[in-house]
Amino acid sequence: MLRFSRILCPTDFSESSRQALKYAKALSAWYDARFTVLHVCVDLPVFEMTSPLGHSVSATGMLEESQLAERRAAVRQFVASEVGEDGVEMGL
């Protein structure tokens, strides 16, 4: 029989990810698996730098601690509103 020990559910707060979250939570309960919700910040500013070798290099900005706290709170609220926070690990 197939066994899962970990379930990872990425989310972008869309309706599709809302449904995926419910299924992932149910799978984690069924298999008694560790359940992690992950949100990746995609709206960070990207800027280009010119390297000494003549080609461009892209880099992303970093979030301030207060912005990071806001993002974490948004993930917690999203998860709690759909499946509760019991037994859920959250990554950002």
Image: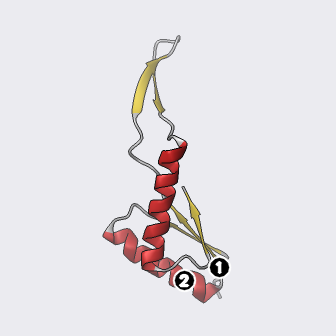
Q: Which residue is mark 1?
A: 33
Three-letter code for the amino acid on which mark 2 is drawn: Leu
Three-letter code for the amino acid on which mark 1 is drawn: Ala
Secondary structure type for disc 1: loop
Residue with the most extreme left position: 15
Q: Which mark is residue 61?
A: none
Looking at the image, residue 59 lies above or below residue 19? above
Looking at the image, residue 54 lies above or below residue 7? above
Looking at the image, residue 47 lies above or below residue 72? above
Query: In x, y percent, where is residue 85?
Result: 55, 76
Question: Foreground residue, 22 or 72?
Answer: 72
Residue at point 38%, 77% (across, down): 19
Q: Which corner quadrant of the image does residue 89 belong to?
A: bottom right
Q: Quadrant of the C terminus?
A: bottom right
The count of marks equals: 2
Secondary structure type for disc 2: helix
Q: Earlier in the sequence, mark 2 or mark 1?
A: 2
Residue with the most extreme front position: 66
Residue at point 47%, 12% (across, down): 54
Query: In x, y percent, where is residue 63?
Result: 50, 41
Looking at the image, residue 92 lies above or below residue 63? below
Query: In x, y percent, where is residue 59?
Result: 48, 30
Residue at point 33%, 65% (across, down): 14
What crowding class fits label 1: few (fewer than 14 Cα within 10 Å), some (14-19), or many (20 or more)? some
Q: Which mark is residue 27?
A: 2
Q: Which corner quadrant of the image does residue 36 belong to?
A: bottom right
Do the CB atoms of the residues marked 2 and 1 lie less than 8 Å apart?
yes
